[in-house]
Amino acid sequence: MSLPRTEETAQALRRSVARQFGRSLHIRTLDTGSCAACEQEIRLLAAPHYDLHRLGFFFTPAPRHADLLMATGPMIRAFDIAARKTYEAMPGPKLVVATGACALGGVYQPDAFTHGSVGDTLPVDVWIPGCPPSPLALLQGLLVAVDRLAEKVRDLTFIQEGGPR
Amino acid sequence: MPLWFLRGLRRGVVTTRYPGQPDASAAQLPTPPAFRPAALTRDLADRLAAICPSWALTRNGDVLFFDAGACTACGRCREAAPGAVTASGEFELAATDPAHLVKRIPLLGEGGS
Amino acid sequence: MTAVGPDLACGRPGLPRLLSQLGYDARAGAGPVVTVSVAAADLEAAVRRLAAHEGARLADFFASGGNPAIDGDPVVLRLVWGLDCDRRYLVTESAIEGERYPALSDIAPAAFAEECEIFEQFGIRPAGGKPLNRVVLPPHAGPDFPRLGRPPAQEPAEVHAQHVVGGHAFEFPFGPVRQVGVESLYYGLVTSGEEVVDLYLFTWHKHRGVEWRLRGRTPREALFHVERTEGLGAVGAAWAFAAAAEAALEAAPPAPAMRARAIALELERLYNHAAATAALCQSTGLTVGQAAAEIALERLLRLNAAAFGHRYLFGVVDIGGARRGPDTAALRRGLPGAYGELRHAADALLATNSFVDRLEATGILTREAARRLGLVGPVARAAGVATDVRADHPAEPYSSRPPAVATGQSGDVLARFRVMLAEAAESVRLIGELLEAGAGPGGADLPESVTGRSDRSGLGWAESSRGEALAWVALDGSGRITRARLRPASVRNWRGFDDACRSQNVFTDIPIIEASFWLTVAGTSR
């Protein structure tokens, strides 16, 4: 479940996103209750093997300087206020990327402890599956978020033709 | 300090060329399943939905709905039915809409189980 | 730094004598776990005896029962004591009627956080009215919030301690949203300027109710969630939990599967120690060292994927054995290079004076504090407390190839770093031996049902990279979980973090100390 966004506003946002963030993007991370594996993969984005700086991406601790919020975890209800405050402290235009299966509605069902998905509390622009998503998957997700790579999963069917083996 | 510098020079560049070029390490990552509709019956679909620990599989009539966003690529569905489920090999899964992650797999298998 | 072999001459009275001192039948049996029922009236005396015993370490304290749907269902308190010299665990069980039980943390300080947790989850509290901290449930958790037992009858505000700051010191809150790429954690920092006067953690932001959610599941279903409680300690937690279920089901995994588990556990230890090295470099501002350690870390994670199909080794441990075996060829090919990166980075770091200076005498944790707080793992070993369940409570495959236990004396950040490096070397050696002996997937036949006994329970343990991970599980007649207790090492060791930060350190030392502990918030707040 996520907050509604119409197709037109989505397209308008995509065009403005490529213009605003295509060359340089500052990222703030947000742990809403993860198991810590997603955080480790995110940290590795700045490591030599992946080096997100070569793509014009940077991490920033200050929400005030951030363009994109990378949120992991199933949005624990006790964390709602901290999540909203972080999001609201970011000046517009801004993007939210839900990162990892927990943030996308997997692993946890909605209950008294967690919402089960980041989309319940924050308006999400891009969803990155994985448990945890590898740094390569994270890079692809960030590039899709700033319109530098085309989304691929929309056209994937996850169907393999042929009879049973 | 020269210690670090020399070692770095000797090691060379380890940085991936992705997205400019594919990265070979991706081949060893676990990936979400791909399904063979001709091998899927209602019974098998129900069993797979029960095995999935992340609520990524649900059956509605003759369609198995697969939520690639909820999937953790744990492999339990594949281990339970290797003739009907394989690894998709896909890791570039970012979506701009959660609906793009929900896939319809028709159940075209014969018989009850 | 000394490496200590596994055969310690303890010279303390062993379990049989201890049991008879406690007034129990000294026929301890052959097993590695001895369970003893202690009447509520005798509990205080028993704990006093055990706490005074040099060879007894309070490893865990938890409750079960207290089902609100069953009138008068008593809460059962269990204390798990590691009798490390005797190579056994002692579990004492006491049924508590009513709302009070003796104040155990006055006798055994290591029990305090658990007393707080038991109050929040089961509504019973230690006698004496000592204020408790909020450790588990968020402040908005009212009487209807899901708990493992009954809600407390008393208003939490009347029971929870307020932090009092006086004199020239002021207090400021830090978190829960902190630096980029680290978990959410809230701490209160008390300072009078630059040095840390006090530091206290709030760990309820990440409480996901894992133990609550495991009830009613089969052990196999539960394993998926156990691994994802603390993802950076997935193998350790899964092994401890699987061992607990196997003890309850009386299932013995085949030897090659146990060796596969051990290889995964040692790989987990390796990558965590590499990650801690990178974090230490980051905290001291040594970017080039951080990059070198991250190269080692990435190579180790890729090795995990090549060997076991997952960078964080999820899905390796199974109830009864191992779901996947290692790709032996890939492991033999990749391990020397990956470990070599870590080794070279470490050697260069220890030769860099500006780095070593930041680590020496920082974040000192004394041996006395480590023992008093019941700490485990490299944190305890660096302070001179030589506990390691691979040596103290050996099960195959460690019993036939006991690892050398690395210890330190100074208890500072440097000692912890050195212990981790020594352990990494030992892990590489162990992996080589385990591969030689042959490792592969496989599982024991698990009983279809466990009818005939309505109460089957078991204790399991593993030496995770952070220290002793414990689990206890109780199954009903259909083999489903009625109570699962998960106790990763982080639960024990965060209480040492406050102590280590307080010992004459300044603000900028806090991230360094945090990196040297290398715990997770997810492991304690679960």
Image (spheres, coloured by chain):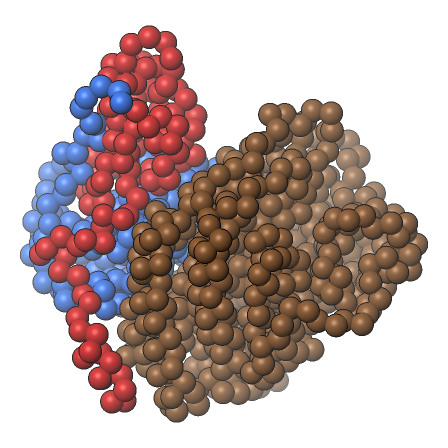
Chain colours: A blue, B red, C brown
Q: Is residue C45 above or below residue C367?
A: above
**In the image, farthest residue toward the top:** B111
Residue C298 % position (x, y)? 30, 63
**Residue at image coords 22%, 31%:** A158
Q: Is residue C462 above or below residue C274?
A: above
Q: In this view, does C352 lie above or below C248?
A: below
Left or right placement of residue C179 versus residue C107 in this view: left
The N terminus of chain C, quarter of image: bottom right
Number of disc labels: 0
Within the image, what quadrant is residue B96 found in? top left
Residue B60 appears anywhere in the view: yes
Of the pair C425 and B60, the residue shown nearer to us: C425
Within the image, what quadrant is residue C445 found in? top right
**Residue at image coords 74%, 65%:** C85
**Residue at image coords 20%, 45%:** B92
**Residue at image coords 53%, 87%:** C361
Left or right placement of residue A112 versus residue C285 in this view: right
Residue C521 % position (x, y)? 49, 59
Residue B55 appears anywhere in the view: no
Left or right placement of residue C135 versus residue C425 in this view: right
Left or right placement of residue C107 versus residue C479 in this view: right
Residue C118 % position (x, y)? 69, 51
**In the image, farthest residue toward the front:** C436
Residue B32 % position (x, y)? 28, 37
